[in-house]
Amino acid sequence: MSTESVEHNAAAGEPSEATVLQTLLRGLEVFEAIAERNGTATAKSLARQLGLKQSTCYHLLRTLRAGDYIVRLPGGQFDIGPHGAALAKNVSARTGPAPDISAILTRLHNKTRETAYVCGWFHGTILRQQVLSGLHALTVKNLDVGYVGNLHARASCQAVLAYLPESQVRTMFSGVELTPLTPNTISNYEALVIELAAVRRRGYALDLEAFEPDICCVAAPFFDAAGAPAGSFTVSVPVSRFGQIRNTLATEVREAGVLATNLLRTGRLTLEPVPSQIPPRAVTRLVTDGTTT
């Protein structure tokens, strides 16, 4: 549908929720690709990456430059401009972790020296809020901040889902296909429920090459003052090293979860030993809601 026809329908009082401005979507895709390339994106590489005609790509780039969302560098590459940076700052302020939660993530990262990240709630879904890369580079798709997909396959999400009321989890996955990303991915709801019960017994969640081949993850939840799961801390490592350090990683992510839970309950960041079980108030809430513990 052309832009003109969209404007006509709106003027006639006939806006349609199915109306999509493809040009706007393509512009946002270009903007996102430039952000990901850290100042190395060229018009030709963007057109090739996004499957655009070069003339279309140049037009979108000119439009983004006119709004100061991007800038053209001396060598012909493109990078984020002043308005783009301001947008990123505002988005980060709304979706990123609180400073003390970020400090706990930094502690986890420094202790493990592995890729670590924190997730939290945003508009009803579990969003990856911050990622710190480890000494050993990982090749993982969708490890970006802001990722919210495939809740069933991610340890970071299972660590949170395990402590929600079962009725809420059922609603979240009702009619949703559990996509098998790898041969190890849980692909039906009944199996997911069984795994969430295992997470509660252990006190942490495991991703054994379920989200990405050759990558394993350990994640532990943290809880708010009311005992509800507020987010999770996760460490990701190559499968080749996972067996040797699994127990250590489980201890470290659980410690991070306890620190964050105490912070949200008391307002103070203090260092305490890792308890043998999840916080009692979280257990009480689960039993009250009828969820298996």
Image (tube, helix red, strand yellow):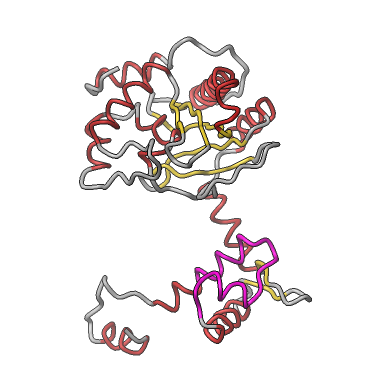
Q: In the shown orientation, is residue 132 left or right of residue 280?
A: right
Which residue is painted at 59% across and 46% down in the image?
Answer: 139
- Camera-side residue: 93 or 40? 40
- In the image, residue 44 lies at what x, y percent? 62, 77
Image quadrant assignment for residue 47: bottom right
Residue 91, quarter of picture: bottom right
**Residue 261 lies in magenta, yes or no?**
no
Which residues fall within the magenta stretch? 28-52
Depicted 127 relative to depicted 160: above or below:
below
136 is higher (above) or lower (below) than 147: above
Of residues 83 and 49, the one nearer the viewer is: 49
| Magenta portion: prevailing SS class | helix
- Residue 120 drawn at (x, y percent): 46, 39
The foreground one among 154 and 170 is 154
Residue 292 location, quadrant: top left
Residue 266 visible to an observer of this rendering:
no
Q: Is residue 61 left or right of residue 27?
A: right
Q: Residue 174: where, in percent of width, then height?
A: 21, 43
Residue at 26% in and 17% down: 287
Relative to 176, is 35 above or below?
A: below
Residue at horizontal 34 percent and vertical 17 percent from the top: 283
**Quadrant of the frame with the C terminus:** top left
| Image quadrant containing the N terminus | bottom left
Furthest toward the right, the residue is: 74
Q: Is residue 31 magenta?
A: yes
**Residue 43 visible in this rendered orientation of the protein:** yes
**60 up-or-down from 266: above or below:** below
